[in-house]
Image (cartoon, grey):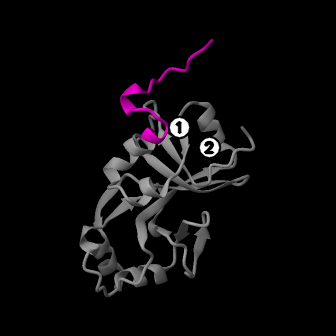
Amino acid sequence: MKNINLTHHFLIAMPTMVDSVFSKTLTYICEHNEQGALGIVINRPTDLTLVSLFKQLGIPQTYSQAEAIPVLFGGPVQLDCGFVLHHPIGNWQSTLTVNKEVGLTTSLDILRAIANAEGPDQVLIAMGYAGWAAGQIEHELAQNAWLTVPATAGVLFDLPSEERLPAAMQLLGIHDANISNEVGHA
């Protein structure tokens, strides 16, 4: 399992996931290489809205729909830092290009653009991220902690947060009620 690359994949937490941080989560992997992996949990909204975030950051806003956009819990690392998953990639100050369709930006210029209705067409805003050391995600996969499936923009951007996990499972052709905690042996 050493040579897998889960960039632009979803990690679906298995029912056996005992870590309360990741229990029942869907995580989008933004980068996976020999140094480790970085992802954003995309199905855990917080009580913080985008308007509240703009106010906290002192960013004036004219975007009228910002109140309805929840800020997500992106993971337990750097909870004081904002991460914006977006399409199209654009030209922002600090962007990790996930693929030709999706970027992950941490600079304030993208938030200012979103506040003025000049940002990317599709965005998810999260506080914090999920990170794995080299080999850690592969070890967790071998321990049956996660299912993986290639990500789709539809699940990532077009669905409300509570529908993303079941939709990702449907990409595998399974319903969450059909997942077993046991590994089969021949």
Quarter of the picture containing the C terminus is top right
Q: Is residue 157 above or below residue 144?
A: below
Residue closest to the eye, 119 or 60: 119
Q: Residues within 10 Å of mark 2 (few under 14, many from 20)?
A: some
Q: Which of the two labelled residues, at mark 1 and mark 2, occupies the earlier sequence position?
A: 2
Q: Residue at left 29%, top 80%?
A: 55
Contact flag, marks 1 and 2 (Cβ < 8 Å): yes
- Residue matched to label 2: 137
Q: How many marks?
A: 2
Q: CA distance from mark 1 to mark 2?
A: 9 Å
Q: Position of residue 165 (x, y in %)?
A: 40, 45
Q: State yes or no: residue 179 in magenta.
A: yes
Crowding at mark 1 (Cα within 10 Å: few <14, some 14-19, many 20+): many
- State which region is magenta: 169-186
| 186 left or right of 114 in image | right
Residue visible at 54% across and 55% down in the picture: 39
